[in-house]
Amino acid sequence: MGNVRLIPRLDIKGPNLIKGIRLEGLRVMGDPQEFALRYYEAGADELVYMDIVASLYGRNNLSDIIRRAADQVYIPITVGGGIRSVDDARHILRSGADKVAINTAAVADPSLITKVSRRFGSQAMVLSIEAKLTAPGKWEAYTDNGRERTGLDVIEWARKGVELGAGEILLTSVDREGTRKGFEVDLIRQISQAVPIPVIASGGMGTVEHLIDAAKSGGADAVAMADVLHYKRLALPDIRAAALKAGLNVRDVQA
């Protein structure tokens, strides 16, 4: 297992960075470029951008924001929201993204996973899964920013995504997102054990202990975080130092 990556997540609405709770109740945080630069300079391993209103427009509208970021941020960038075709993926990748994260369109047409993977490489095809707990130990995949049910079991859908060519999974717990109550570790563990590709855990980080739990007990390969960084509850250098002290295999930026 490689280093556990620390990934700031930037949810975007129009030109603004926003933050909500359980993907609702959105609050404007500011200019995403300012936050991206701050996180890059603080040692972030990657960035994730999500266009959270892309379904209203019928396409991803982050290309200008991604171009600005790619000019000054030299770490991998994943972009999701409203990517419905190979052409959409090409447009975002040409704008400066390294990977595309696809959820709604992949559920509607699973062959899109294969098409994107074959065209740009599996490393560029991230299957984004928004999960809600439906029964003890059971989660259902949702689309449209956690609003629409799919009837798909999250574990089975993750396995299917791998078969179709996904190279990574961005796993968001809708129930935990923005709550700062910790990650859905049981879900992360089940997905990590079910698939041979990296899993990014998203939704719920409130303390460094939550990150350590997601990685050590859940087997997460990366942790996405938003609230704790946007509101400056925690700083990336402090998170990294605490993770290293706890024996977590994270990149030592001082090395």
Image: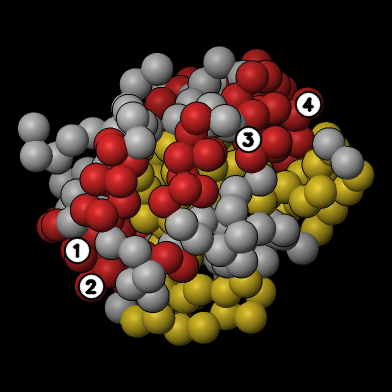
The quadrant of the image that shows the C terminus is: top left
Amino acid at the residue labelled 1? Leu
Mark 1 vs 4, N-terminal side: 1
Amino acid at the residue labelled 2? Glu
Mark 3 vs 4, N-terminal side: 4
Measured in 3D between alpha carbons, the distance from the residue under mark 2 to the one under mark 3, in whole angstroms, is 31 Å
Q: Residue at x 30, y 46 (%)?
A: 242
* Element under disc 2: helix
Q: Is residue 197 visible?
A: yes
Label 1 crowd bin: few (<14), some (14–19), many (20+), radius 10 Å = some
Measured in 3D between alpha carbons, the distance from the residue under mark 3 to the one under mark 4, in whole angstroms, is 14 Å
Image marks 1 and 4: residues in contact by CB distance under 8 Å: no
Q: Nearer the viewer, mark 2 or mark 3?
A: 3
Residue corresponding to mark 3: 188
Residue corresponding to mark 1: 37
Label placed on residue 7: none
